[in-house]
Image (cartoon, grey):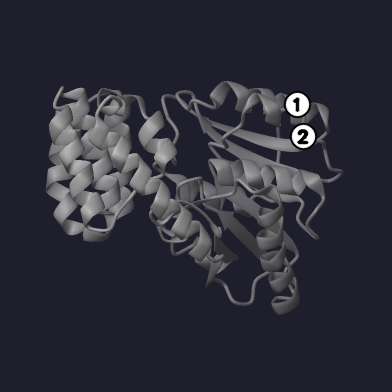
Amino acid sequence: MFHDTEKKLISLFVQKEWDEAYALILQDEPNHPGKLHKFSFWKACLLCIKNEPDEALATLQNAFDKGFWWNPDLLKGDQDLTPLHEKKAFQGLIDECEKRKKQAMEEARPLVEFHGNQDPSAAVVVLHGRGGNMEDTIPYWMNEMSVRDCLFAFLQSSQAAGYEAYGWDDADKTIREVQGIVNKIIKDYPDVERIILAGFSQGGKTAIKLVLSEELERTNEFYAVVPAIREEDLQMGGKSGARGWIVTGTEDPFYAETKKLKQHLEKQKVKCEWIEYEGMSHTYPEDFTELFQTSFQSKKVTR
């Protein structure tokens, strides 16, 4: 499955195993033609690391010519692509990606897929990370046991952030889209007693914020995986009865601020279970589906 390859590549990048990462890309890219935007980006980064910037640019251009593209901020901000910044053709590629992003933003619509128990007592609303989508998020959360336990609602934002990539930057749009799904769950599944807002990265941060904001009815629990917490997020207010889980890794770039947030939430009397993985970067844990199922079944959250 693609998400297995993606997890392996992220791990190899963190370990700086460049040759092994490049070999994996060459091996698996033909098996996932619809993910050329991801494989070509990873390949371009590695080619720059290997001091082959012309090949890197050609790799990106080839994917673009086939209809794929990237968020201009990603192209400009990724440090591995720094050798391309002075190339006129690279600046032209960024400009063309900006045009495609604008068109995608005009065309994007919110989506949702429901999976799992259709007579549930609990529902989990899952938000993808920034630059993610519904399809790539689903495999991380579900296994044979978890789909028996609860109803999953996987959302895809209407806010385009790249090719088949979306985000939650607009707070007002985000609240409307999540509120619509929460209302649908309450209406269509009247026996649901728990609605957990969950998410990865920006989606995890958004889940925490929405639960604590009291904007949404009957949402008192959050489940955040490597939430993208920044300094300005440390002033979130508490909510009586709110509780949740935070899954993080010591190599996650948001680790320090996330730890500060946990301490802040404790002061606000928000019960929060801290699950830390030594050496894990900004990704899902290898055992995440089992971890989530265990956490979900444990209704009592301890510090």
Q: Nearer the viewer, mark 1 or mark 2?
A: 2
Please give the name of the residue rendered at 76% of the width and 31% of the height, measured from the top-left corner: 265
In the image, 279 versus 102, the foreground residue is 102
Binning the other alpha carbons within 10 Å of mark 1 as few (below 14), some (14 to 19) or many (20 upward) gives some
Q: Which residue is mark 2?
A: 236
Position of residue 166 relative to residue 153, above or below, is above
Toward the viewer: 100 or 10? 100
The residue beneath circle 1 is 264
Query: Is 126 left or right of 62, judged from the image as shown?
Result: right
Q: Quadrant of the N terminus?
A: bottom left
Q: Can the viewer see residue 300 in this picture?
A: no
Label number found at residue 147: none
Q: Residue 176 lies in what quarter of the image?
A: bottom right
Is 287 on the left or on the right of 55, as rendered?
Answer: right
- x, y (%) of residue 248? 53, 32
Specify few, some or many for label 2: CA neighbours under 10 Å numbering under 14, 14-19, or 20 or more.
some
Residue 73: percent from the left, percent from the top?
A: 44, 37
Helix, strand, or loop for circle 1?
helix
Callout 2 amino acid: Met
Q: Amino acid at mark 1?
A: His
Q: Is residue 8 above or below residue 19?
A: below
Q: Secondary structure at mark 2?
A: loop
Which residue is at the front of the view, 2 or 147?
Answer: 2
State whether residue 135 appears in this view: yes
